Amino acid sequence: MKGISCSLIVFVFASGISSAAELKPAMLSWLAAQTNLQSWSADFVQTRVLKSLTQPLTATGHVWFKAPNQFRWELGQPVQTIAARAAADLLVLYPRLKRVEKFPLTSEQSGPWRDALGLLEAGFPRSQAELESQYTLLSQVITNNVAELVLQPRSASARRMIPRIKIEFNMKDLALLATELQFSDGSTLRNDFKNAVLNPSLDAQMFSPQIPADYKVVEPLQKR
């Protein structure tokens, strides 16, 4: 996946917390608060740092999330890329190119991309057990009312692509502030969120966008 397809792998989930590490009370409070989250939306600033570039790449956008695993990312103003998890597919639309990529979500599909897809849902674990089943906890720090968790996917294939994930939240209201992915090549992809709305009413259609008739449909994972 390219563009946001790569940046897609930004919101969050793969695989656990080491039994040797115990979550601090503040982290447990944040996890407990997730049970009240049914939907969420926010503006974001996305920053990509690449070793080959002297200056980071930045873009703005908006994200919508509906529990347990529906999401829609819009990147750029005007929108250049839309990524939405539909019922049976992950759709990545490029309006300027009139192109859409479809990635099936069937159980038959497996491999690194499936593990990477799980990362899109990170940031909203539904329980401590869910978090511990998916990540190894590397560190947990609280500074100036901002809590930071650094996690490592348990899935070997996801870990080869994205060895570390950072989640930041506000200690005062337990709101998600940022997510950051570190890729195996040393590059990073960070989303800083603002103007978040908790439990907004969301139209189910936004997660299953209609594909215009003049768009070219591509299925990158289709076997030839």
Image: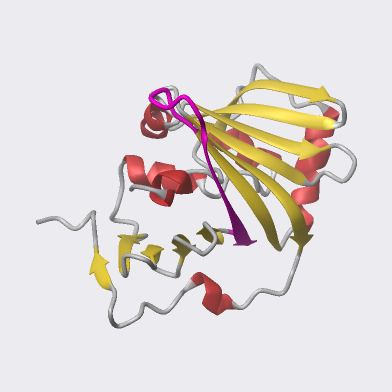
Q: Is residue 162 magenta?
A: no
Please say if 200 is above or below 4: below
Give the residue drawn at x 51%, y 48%.
Answer: 120
Give the residue at x 37% y 60%: 105
- In the visual, does 41 lie left or right of 207? right
Quadrant in which residue 151 is drawn:
top right
x and y percentages locating residue 86 in the rendered image:
45, 68
Boundaries of the magenta span:
49-68
* Residue 112 image offset from top left, x and y in percent: 34, 39
Classify residue 92 as left or right of residue 67: left
Residue 18 visible in the current orientation: yes
Q: Looking at the image, which residue sits at the far bottom?
A: 213
Q: Is residue 67 visible?
A: no
In the displayed structure, 145 sits above or below 195; it is above
Q: Position of residue 218 (x, y in %)?
A: 24, 64
Between 59 and 174, the residue placed more toward the observer is 59
Res. 204 image quadrant? bottom right
How many circles with numbers are drawn on the protein? Answer: 0
Indicate the quadrant containing the C terminus: top left, top right, bottom left or bottom right: bottom left
Q: Residue at x 51, y 70 (%)?
A: 207
In the displayed structure, 38 sits above or below 189; it is below
Q: Is residue 94 above or below residue 35?
A: below
Residue at the location (76% across, 39% down)? 169
Q: Please identify the residue farthest to the top as the structure is shown.
A: 20
Q: Residue extending furthest left?
A: 224
Q: How is the image coloured?
A: secondary structure
Q: Residue 78: x, y in percent?
A: 52, 64
Q: Residue furthest front?
A: 54
